[in-house]
Amino acid sequence: MMRSFPRWLTPYAFLAPALLVLGLTVFWPALQAFYLSFTEYGYDITQPPLWVGWDNFVRLWEDERFWQTLGNTLIYLVGVVPILAIAPLLIAILVNQKLKGMTWFRVAYYTPVVISMVVAGIAWRWLYAETGLFNQLLSQVTGHDIRIPWLTSPNLALFSVMAVTVWKGLGYYMVIYIAGLQGIPEDLYEAAAIDGSERWRKHWDITLPLMKPYMFLVAVISAISATKVFEEVYIMTQGGPRSSSKTVVYYVYEQAFVNLEMSYACTIGLVIFVVILALSWIRLRIAPTEL
């Protein structure tokens, strides 16, 4: 007679298929990338990796282009995260009102989320063109021929790409905030109204304190997304002009698939992994948990 299947193994049996797929597509490639960061590999993929120890990390420390792209990524993070942590909350408060037609406003704000980044990037590149819609509107308003180089100026390119990231993310984070707002009891607002808190004052006294866990969650998620930004840069600027909009992830792509320096790309990727791991640790250790 066959022995019965141990009950304690039942959860692992259900998890086994997913763990197998994750192991083959995520964990094993990650371990390989970690190993390759200590080797020299890429120019000739028919040759086995050559162990070089810490040479790639020394090179990374002395690589001025890496530090430039890391600085651009930090600017991206500092510029995008505060906006995506605050603006979607204001929009969520607005569309959470029980007024006629608010459903359409929710759909309008969420529509950019479902649009492909490729489509969005091409559309915004047309808008940013020197003869695009933005410059035409400015020309009509000022009465002068305005040709602002939104994507071709080293001083504007990165911020122009950041605007697309903000536009694309507003609706996504708005939904998170709406979920939090709908969990706040109406009795609290009624009690606040009796105490004299009305209109925006009630949101300052009640909404903001109760939404702090959601705000921290959005800040961490948007920070991780800003650290990994790639599609916008690739589609709109290709990292230019003069690497002014090149981010760390784009630099990884450039080293791996343009320069064919796979090992050096893995080294940079390992740095990105450490940064994202640190942000995730902050979320788990410091963030409020009352979600």
Image (cartoon, grey):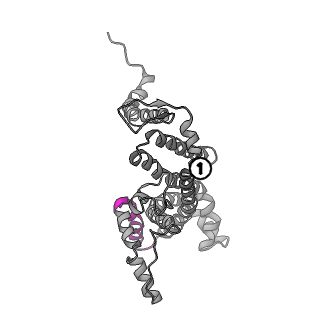
Quarter where residue 223 is shown: bottom right
Q: Is residue 147 left or right of residue 282?
A: left
Dot 1 alpha-carbon crowd within 10 angstroms: few under 14, some 14 to 19, many 20 or more:
few
Q: Is residue 173 left or right of residue 25?
A: right
- Asked if residue 104 lies in the magenta stretch, the reply is yes
Question: Secondary structure of the magenta portion, mostly?
Answer: helix
**As drawn, 184 above or below 273:** below
Q: Where does the image place residue 115, in percent across and percent down from the top left?
A: 35, 61
> Closest to the observer: 181 or 65?
65
At 53% from the left edge and 54% from the top edge, which residue is drawn? 69
**As drawn, 271 above or below 118:** above
Q: Residue furthest top?
A: 1
Q: Where does the image place residue 78, in percent across and percent down from the top left?
A: 58, 60
Quarter where residue 195 is shown: bottom right
At 38% from the left edge and 70% from the top edge, which residue is drawn? 104
Residue 1 visible in the picture: yes
Q: Is residue 152 left or right of residue 215?
A: left
Q: Magenta segment range?
A: 99-118
> Closest to the observer: 274 or 245?
245
> Closest to the observer: 192 or 282?
282
Residue 116 visible in the picture: no
Residue type at mark 1: give it: Glu
Q: Residue furthest bottom?
A: 143
Q: Where does the image place residue 6, in percent across and percent down from the top left?
A: 42, 19
Q: Is residue 251 left or right of residue 185?
A: left
* Quadrant the N terminus occupies: top left
Quarter where residue 184 is shown: bottom right
- Total numbered circles: 1
Q: Secondary structure at mark 1?
A: loop
- Asked if residue 152 lies in the magenta stretch, the reply is no
Q: Which residue is mark 1?
A: 290
At 56% from the left edge and 48% from the top edge, which residue is drawn? 63
